[in-house]
Amino acid sequence: MKGFQIGLAEELGIDEANIDVVCPFVGGGFGGKGSLFTWVSLIAAASRDLGRPVKLYVTREQGFTTASFRAETRQTVRLGAAEDGTFQALEHTGDELTSRADNYFVNGQDAAVRMYQADAIRTGLTTVHADRQTPGFMRAPAETPYFFGLESAVDEIARELAMDPVELRIKNDTMVDPVDGVPYTSRSLKECFRQGAEAFGWSNYKPEIGSMNEGEWLIGWGVATSTYPTQMSPCTVRLHLDITGEARLQVASHDVGTGAYTVLTQAVADELGIPVEKVRVEARGFAAAARHDRRRFDLDRLQRLGDHDRLRAHSPAARPSKGRRCGPCGCLRAVRPGGY
């Protein structure tokens, strides 16, 4: 949401505080509706010039050129391993297609090479500008094609070494980022493989082509791993408490169909110790976010109306680590180190 405000403000030449992004529900976003496309600012400019609402309608066919798409990639993976299966060297390079007007690129091999340990790692990327619209996220994280390339190489190594592909991956698991050496806070890949293999009946796996069948059907089993570079940043929200004991959370975000409203409601209810029915979440890009609400809340009266101990335990004075009073207006600003 904030990115939309900043981008539109730059393209329209106005203050971002004058832009209100309204998008309470998307549904089925899969990331593909999270980018600021060129036509958004063009529609806003047309609406401003005409002094009336403007809405863009596109046909199914036009959607293939007005929206983004998953960029074609050409990848080269070189993977070396010792006889015991330990990865010694990994090189993963890629060529990506992008538009002539944009410098968009995924660089997905940077995430892929962090999947397993290797003594030496090298990556590279070349972008190819073509007469196409700018690519983007499509149905899954843009890093996905790069994991297909890496996992295919791991399977080839497993065949060359006559090793079980699951055991090969477990052997090269790591609790430290192999690129920068930073320890992972948590990682349960081995446990996932063990439990998945048991549930799937992996002990019956046969690597030879054509060696497995169900009746008259030849079947094949495979395994692959993938990850996504978690992107977390500080998030500032506005939390309003009224005299009825209800809480209203305002955050510059939207729900793409993954349940953000539910999670935010549960988080507020848990932090304040109130029923979820008492929580209302407003997720949108607030133009008013830069302007403080100067009304002060009578916390003493609020405590008298509700559970004294519970409300007192969650007041700003009692819990300075969870939020702070805003100087200009006295509202409670909750600052979470990572957001939702």
Image (cartoon, rainbow, N blue to C red):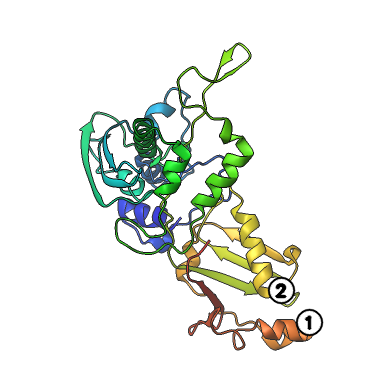
Residue 76 locus on image (x, y percent): 25, 34
Callout 2, which amino acid? Gly
Q: Residue furthest front?
A: 83
User: In the image, residue 245 lies at what x, y percent?
Assistant: 74, 75
The answer to whether residue 271 is above or below residue 214 is below
- Relative height, residue 198 to residue 279 (above, below): above
Q: Which residue is mark 2?
A: 273
Closer to the camera, 104 or 15? 104
Visible in this render: residue 257?
Answer: no
Three-letter amino acid code at the position of disc 1: Asp
Task: Indicate which disc, 2 or 1, sits on the residue closer to the N terminus.
Answer: 2
Residue at image point 60% right, 88% down: 317
Report the disc number at residue 92: none
Q: Nearer the viewer, residue 211 or 282?
A: 211
Task: Quickly name the residue at label 1.
Answer: 307
Label pair 2/1, CB-CB below 8 angstroms: yes
Give the crowd class for mark 1: few <14, some 14-19, many >=20 residues within 10 Å. Answer: few
Labels 2, 1: front one: 2
Point 31% across, 41% down: residue: 83
Q: Secondary structure at mark 2?
A: loop
Q: Nearer the viewer, residue 2 or 199?
A: 199
Q: Report crowding for label 2: few under 14, some 14 to 19, many 20 or more residues within 10 A (C-alpha).
A: few
Q: Looking at the picture, how far across and down is residue 290, in whole percent?
A: 45, 69
The answer to whether 333 is drawn above or below residue 259 in the figure is below
User: Which residue corresponds to the image point at 73% horizontal and 67% vertical from the top-left?
Assistant: 278
Horizontal side, residue 229 vs residue 103: left or right: right
Determine the residue positioned at 73% across, 78% down: 243
The secondary structure type at the circle numbered 1 is: loop
Q: Position of residue 298 (x, y in %)?
A: 67, 85
Displayed quadrant of residue 304: bottom right
| Gap in angstroms between the C-alphas marked 2 and 1 | 10 Å
